[in-house]
Image (cartoon, rainbow, N blue to C red):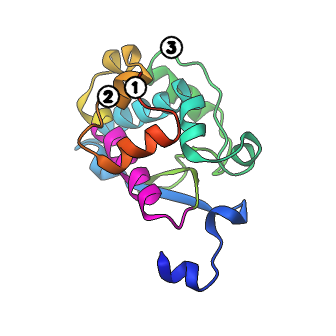
Amino acid sequence: MQRARELKYLSHTAQTCGLHVHINRAALGETVEEQENTIGRIVYFFEKFWTEILRFSRRTEGQANRWAARYGCSIENPKETLKNVKKSYLGRYVAVNLTNQFTVELRIFRGTLKYETFAATLQFVDKLCHDAIELSDEQFQTMTWADFAKSVKDMPELTDYLKIRGLEAK
């Protein structure tokens, strides 16, 4: 990242640069059904906590609408959320892009040349995926942002970043 700055790369200040994180679908469950359930919980999380995720991402609402839009569908439960998302095909420029055959792409994050922000973003995705695999739909439905923020205490960059962005558990 230091070298990129020396070469005058812009990343965050370019206004259009994104940090896209691809998650291998095979890592989200052993069967297609397990993978779909996990993906449903990820999409549900993004829809439920859109305001917090947008703040975390460092994107403006306008940037998100252009490059990483919200589906804006009902969030009754993760299975229904995923079903509604699949019916409302919006292309690839959505926060949780499901158009890739082998990966789920998270497009919401603004680009960065700061190691701490990069590490916090990867820790966020790692924790979200872990929870989406391990927790039930019911647990996701009752989870609050504070619950999620409290659960990252062993991830120092993410913990610090949540404080910086005003997203820590209160």
Would residue 117 be found to the left or right of residue 99 on screen? left
Marks 1 and 3, how far apart at CA: 24 Å
- Name the residue type under label 1: Ala
Marks 1 and 2, how far apart at CA: 6 Å
Q: Are marks 1 and 2 in contact (CB under 8 Å)?
A: yes
- Name the residue type under label 3: Glu
Tell me where residue 108 appears, x and y as whole percent: 58, 48
Q: Are marks 1 and 3 in contact (CB under 8 Å)?
A: no
Q: Are marks 2 and 3 in contact (CB under 8 Å)?
A: no
Would residue 117 be found to the left or right of residue 60 on screen? left
Tell me where residue 120 appears, x and y as whole percent: 40, 51
Marks 2 and 3, how far apart at CA: 24 Å
Q: Is residue 122 magenta?
A: yes
Q: Which residue is mark 1?
A: 169
Whichever of callouts 1 and 3 sits on the residue coming sooner in the sequence is 3
The span picked out in magenta is 112-130
Would residue 168 be found to the left or right of residue 46 on screen? left
Q: Which residue is mark 2?
A: 150
Tell me where residue 68 appears, x and y as whole percent: 64, 47
Q: Which residue is mark 3?
A: 76
Whichever of callouts 2 and 3 sits on the residue coming sooner in the sequence is 3
Q: Is residue 53 above or below residue 15?
A: above
